[in-house]
Amino acid sequence: MSDSRPTIYFIRHGETDWNLEGRLQGQKDIPLNDLGRVQAEEAGRRLMGLVPHVEDLAYVASPMTRTRETMALLRTAMGLDPESYRLDERLVELTFGDWEGLTWKEVRKKEPQLAALRERDKWNYAPPGGESYAMLTARVRPILDDLTRDTVVVAHGGVARAFLAATCGVSTRDAASIDIWQGKVLVIQRRSYRWV
């Protein structure tokens, strides 16, 4: 990826009750909670502090409820039309398959051998009926190639990890475990990243 690639302002959706409970959401369509709505507005204010003309950016979101809510709230906080952005199905979170709705503690108790396999290789392991980070990266990589201008992407923790591995050279081992914060902006620029 050359230095001429557009800057990505990546925002993870705000908190949901399942985030709070430590449940694997994956592709379950869980809405934001009260804190998640505040985090979405905070992300909008952070973005305004970063970019002088937020109206000049492209905006794209995962079609899930929690990401659409986050996008609408952050755009409203910046004085922009809350509905004026596009959706991209490829940005949906990776699916945890049969494990969705469970906590990691429940997964380890229910399927200790499979949980151990995932711990050994988080990037390449796909849960029963689910996806691996490697599969997710293959799904989202074309989005990165399609970007023609600086873009705000509202999506999910797994998608952020895939972006970091694909664009910044973060090792797959590190990318699989990196914390992706809610309410902050992950700036991906010139093969590096920083949090604002």
Image (cartoon, helix red, strand yellow):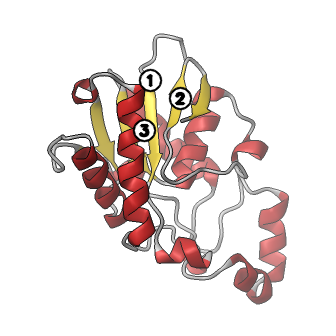
The reply to whether the C-beta atoms of the residues labelled 1 and 3 are less than 8 Å apart is: no
Find the distance from the CA under tag 1 to the CA under tag 3.
Answer: 16 Å
Front position among marks 2 and 3: 3
Q: Mark 1 points at which residue?
A: 7
SS at circle 1: loop
**Is 51 rendered above or below residue 92?**
above
Q: What element carries label 3?
A: helix
**Residue beneath label 3, please?**
46
Give neighbour class at mark 2: few <14, some 14-19, many 20+ (Cα, 10 Å).
many
Q: Mark 2 points at which residue?
A: 188
Left or right: residue 126 compared with residue 50: right
Badge 1 density bin: few <14, some 14–19, many ≥20, Cα 10 Å = many
Q: Nearer the viewer, residue 185 or 38?
A: 38
Amino acid at pointer 2: Ile
Tell me the quadrant of the picture where the C terminus can be found: top right
**Residue 30, above or below 10:** below
